[in-house]
Amino acid sequence: MIHSLFLINASGDIFLEKHWKSVVSRSVCDYFFEAQERASEAENVPPVISTPHHYLLSVYRHKIFFVAVIQTEVPPLFVIEFLHRVVDTFQDYFGVCSEVMIKDNVVVVYEVLEEMLDNGFPLATESNILKELIKPPTILRTVVNTITGSTNVGDQLPTGQLSVVPWRRTGVKYTNNEAYFDVIEEIDAIIDKSGSTITAEIQGVIDACVKLTGMPDLTLSFMNPRLLDDVSFHPCVRFKRWESERILSFIPPDGNFRLLSYHVSAQNLVAIPVYVKHNINFRDSSSLGRFEITVGPKQTMGKTVEGVMVTSQMPKGVLNMSLTPSQGTHIFDPVTKLLTWDVGKINPQKLPSLKGSMNLQAGTSKPDENPTINLQFKIQQLAISGLKVNRLDMYGEKYKPFKGIKYMTKAGKFQVRT
Amino acid sequence: MAASPAYGEEKGGSSSLGEPEYGHDPASGGIFASDYKRHDDLKEMLDSNKDSLKLEAMKRIVAMIAWGKNASDLFPAVVKNVACKNIEVKKLVYVYLVRYAEEQQDLALLSISTFQRGLKDPNQLIRASALRVLSSIRVPIIVPIMMLAIKEAASDMSPYVRKTAAHAIPKLYSLDSDQKDQLIEVIEKLLADKTTLVAGSVVMAFEEVCPERIDLIHKNYRKLCNLLIDVEEWGQVVIINMLTRYARTQFLSPNQNESLLEESAEKAFYGSEEEDTKDAKAEAASLAKRKPYVMDPDHRLLLRNTKPLLQSRNAAVVMAVAQLYFHLAPKAEVGVIAKALVRLLRSHSEVQYVVLQNVATMSIKRRGMFEPYLKSFYIRSTDPTQIKILKLEVLTNLANETNISTILREFQTYIRSMDKDFVAATIQAIGRCATNIGKVRDTCLNGLVQLLSNRDELVVAESVVVIKKLLQMQPAQHSEIIKHMAKLTDNIQVPMARASILWLIGEYCEHVPKIAPDVLRKMAKSFTNEEDIVKLQVINLAAKLYLTNSKQSKLLTQYVLNLAKYDQNYDIRDRARFIRQLIVPTEKSGALNKYAKKLFLAQKPAPILESSFKDRDHFQLGSLSHLLNAKAVGYQELPDWPDEAPDPSVRNVEVPEWTKCTSREKRKDKVEKPFYSDSEGESGPTESADSEPESDSEESGSSSSSGTSSSSSEEQSEDKEGEEEEEEKRKKKKEKGGPRKASPRSVGSEEEEEAEGKKVKKAAGPQGKKGHAETSSEEASASESSSSGSDSGTEAPTVVEAKRRKVIPSSKAGPKEISLLDLDDFTPPPPQPVPSSSIISTSLVTDLEGLTLTDTSLAPALLSPAFGAVRTYELLHRMAGEGLSVEYCFSRRPFPGDPHMVAVQIQISNNTDAEVKSLRVSEPKLLAGMRIQEFPEIESLAPGDTASVVMGIDFCDSTQAANFQLCTHTRHFYVSIQPPVGELMAPVFMSENEFRKEQGKLTGMSEITEKLTLPEKCRSDHAIVQQVTSAANVGRVPCGADNEYRFAAKTVTSGSLVLITLEWREGAAAQLTVNSEKMVIGTMLVKDIIQALAQ
């Protein structure tokens, strides 16, 4: 299956290679560089490239290309999903996944990769198990290691791979037993010029941070489980139980994990919490354009909209913009033509607005397209779909855990066409 | 260089060891001396007896390997440490060994004995890791040792070691393919393993070593299916892909009948009429030939056990299941994958890329599947271009008559995008929509013509090319456009566009007789500066003009041909020479000259703008080959369905527990078969042909409910299924036992309902009076309102009907039965034995119990439906249906066989003067989750006859229409059934207290209150009850308070409660409250009820 992996940074240097079968020369990446050159932007590099003897499958994350080399037929998603899992694991191990981090921890990275694949076939991809095999570096451990000269390789033989719950490591112990669940919903929407909704959906996830001793068996039930239209689970969730009772029953992995992600059925109308009033005008003969946007709250169920951030890709003809925001800060990058306005909180009494003019390139005609406005925002303590967790129970262990549930609504791909 | 940070760390490490001078050397500079020296220092460290030094050295070496530098000269020094006690050092040594053993084979042999020792270790993990490293060392000399080790490990006690053995198999195979036979033996042994840990790995080995040995799978098939859900995710992908291929060789196509229809339907859509009738004949023949299809239980097992995996978080697993369903499932079931695939579109862009490619292919074959998700494919300006283009492709594939206007509106936004590649693709897409959907061709064309004045040249050029293709379809009407385009030649520089314009003018020069020569003149002037492709078209234009209008263009043509004669490009010279010979008559030129006009101005077929994803589905979906549209190395062809199913008994396993039941059931099945054929003889071929698929789908229905049990309890569900099947048979037996007693009655009652509604209104009155206490109120109102309009005339008989179903109807067989006798050939799928309404309602309750929110103390019993007014709707008008008229109504009875379906009674009358044959439903286009239980095919309907059938539709608690085709032997009619929201529920009985309690739970967002004014005639108790029950299928709940009416129902699919309270205040004022978890249903219901009351 997966023959080799190359990590390539933004400037086109291969800074790590790992082979699971015979060595494949790094010259195979030349094909990749060719494709990279052809695609103007990094995200436009085709994920699958066919070369005379190999196929290159790549993912682009954190400004790094992870290029897998394969030789024979294999489902492309298999490889892509695996590569993403690799990135997630790195992130889990080092906090961030960046070129510097990988280079600093090259031995750990190499060992982790060695454990994740055997002969190109995934072996251990659960981070709980990997962490048993190879301890993630912490500051304390790094200090200890430099003094005692030990590494991060686990010195006990890991047993996680053998257990029936392969996602949970054994012998977990905490003094404070706690389980936190974050219900995070994202609104994906496209809003029309006139303010009407073209499409809007709610996608949610429940991220958990579970630090419980022993082998707890948890059940989580919802007040209104029928809201969930399409769900996908962490493998720990017992599917049959969900099917029959709409209850999430699971033995959780240790630490952070995504319990489930869901989609709220399209039949339910999606409440759009903010609106954008815009007036963007390019005048034909003049080299000045008008720009004015106002953001205001709509259906927020009485909560404040926070962390509002407006970004907009201006047309190439715009040379500069002179704008005054009523609150927050704004930046216009004249090279990438990206306008960013960090609004902050929306005060319903005094709606934030950004007004001013645009300098257009003289001589050229006005751009055909008005820029689309991308919106970011956050609403704490609210799940916009109305999903509510009913209760969380624990079986199998005697202690009383501390439980917490947090709701949050965010903008996903929230776009306003103008 | 990027190297420096990593190097910096190394340096830091080495500096602590007091050798900083080597550390400063960059990788590139002064290589030889320092490299040599540095390795010397590493060797020293490895030779020392301090573990910490060794470890430090190994870390630096591994960093070198990761960095891609050659560390092979350290091999002897490293390999010595293979037996090191320190587990960390050892691990790193393994890493090194695996990397370099291939290059240093002799030295690598030194380490082998260590691993051999490790293979005997009492600890399973050490055994496993020893085998893993041993098998990873690619040294041919140790092949026998590896073989031995694998064989031993394959029968190890520990499943983990066996898993490692499975992993080692492909490694050995790639090293020495001569070992294949021996390895297959090991694979066979491991395939029989019962642990989930091993399953994925061994199937992986199977796929790499011997994918052609499908016979090895037979015995393990059922086990693999049952273990599947517990296998780790990567293994699931491999197993599912393998099982897809396996199923294609072992089972019959579940769509063999549909596929015939589908083909002919497609042709009928595009083809000429001649073909049409021919097809119809062929189809009729093939229909006659077709055998009843029964899905192999093993086939069903696979489908059932893979379905939950659509919920996996792993995109590869979801995709694998999706392709399995696409390739193996009956058409009606494929829809379930759409939702999951659309979900994947939220994932990373690479995942989107792959998924969209597959969706594009699927959407060509099964458009209806993705139609409900149209909006999920809308494009955002932040999408990468490659994603945009794929989404565009999907949108174009999904476009049809109904949604084209929305799609075109979207396209309008896209055209103004800044991303010009994407704009070009959009224009192409518009072109494709215009060719596929005739209705919008003119709109599209106008839009494209407007684009011709766009400032961006690329946009104009692309539009020209597309317009050219569109004009070819109907040139005569568009000479204006051609003229407009002729003007563009002055401005457009893009060669492809220029060439297109010239071709167009040449081709249709009769339509623009004045302009064409002028264009030629201009082009002749600039001929030498044109691109080759344009020059060729100039020559073409010249030739065509010469033939049609030689007076004006003779000299020009000669001039152009002369220029071309001395062109640099030989293609152009050749073309010029060829054309001159052809068109200019000389004594040498032969007979061809006469036909020149025919040659050049022949009618050319319009180009078909096709998706590039058409026919890609001959590659297994989700595969690399499919993505590349080319066969990748090692791709296993997806075999075609066999014509005859191979012997299913090969999958029977002798003793194992988990399959015992299946095989028993199978045997039973076989024993029972003669029973079927016997009865066939009795009741004619039609019935058996239809009743068998019926029972099959019945089974699938049960499987979806019983499939929830875990794989360990599979047995149980299998049993249940068996039972159900048996029950089904019993029913049939009953039916056949008294062929003219039981079934005619049930048909009869349905028939009568319609017949009575039309003819026997008079009977309604008196019979309505003999009512039950329970229904008396409705009845009274029914008889009352029967006088008010002919529309409500049908109500009364229905009430009668309802009664007759409760009181065993024996008295009322009546005179109508005679006329109905000839209809009972097309008995609907046993429409519940007669006295059954109570039975069914209890079974409904049990079925729904698992789904209710309420606590067990409550257990609201489902009422037998209160028969209020039944309104009929038109499905197919007599005119539209060419004499065939179809009406439907919601009978408000539980649909037999599936409590989640709404029963729809369909009445078909044949008003033509010919017999209508093989009436049936096909190609349902449903939203995800919706299901249809088709009515059995009606063999034939004589002129003037009317037939009534019942079909079940699971609307998923939405008011979205169910679209399907109603087919006769000659025609297909697109029809749709849209349920009023009130029909999506069934009444439940509850006490006042229960009602209050439930209502208390459903407050807040789930409560909708509306004020209304009651009109004069609606101010009596029964008028209100009557109106509410006519608007919705609800049951009345007793209420203590005066002037307050309560109703309760449950939605049919999800069983959510719907509670209605109507409070009548003074005078005409009233307040309506609906409590329901389904807010949408609640809102719509309020609207409907208010409307009903206002009437």
Image (tube, coloured by chain):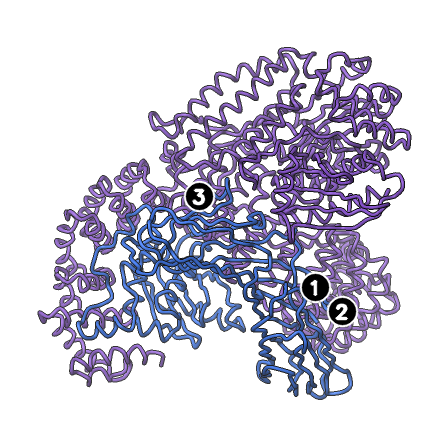
Chain colours: A blue, B purple
B54 with respect to B794 (left or right): left
C-alpha gap between disc 3 and disc 1: 39 Å
Chain assignment, label 1: B
Q: Residues within 10 Å of mark 3 (few under 14, many from 20)?
A: many
Upstream in the sequence, badge 2 or badge 3?
A: 3
User: Of the residues shown, which amino acid type is indicated by label 3?
Assistant: Ile
Image quarter of the C terminus of chain A: bottom right
Q: Residues within 10 Å of mark 2 (few under 14, many from 20)?
A: some
- Residue B427: which disc? 1
Image quarter of the N terminus of chain A: bottom left
Upstream in the sequence, badge 3 or badge 1?
A: 3
Q: Is residue B255 visible?
A: yes
Q: Is residue B573 visible?
A: no
Reply above or below: B515 against A2: below
Looking at the rendered structure, whether the residues under marks 2 and 1 are on a common chain is answered as: yes
Q: Please say if the residues under marks 2 and 3 sit with CB atoms less than 8 Å apart.
A: no
Chain assignment, label 3: B
Q: Please say if the residues under marks 2 and 1 sit with CB atoms less than 8 Å apart.
A: yes
Reply above or below: B285 against B166: above
- Residue B451: which disc? 2
* Element type at mark 2: helix
Residue position marked by numbered label 3 in the rendering: B240
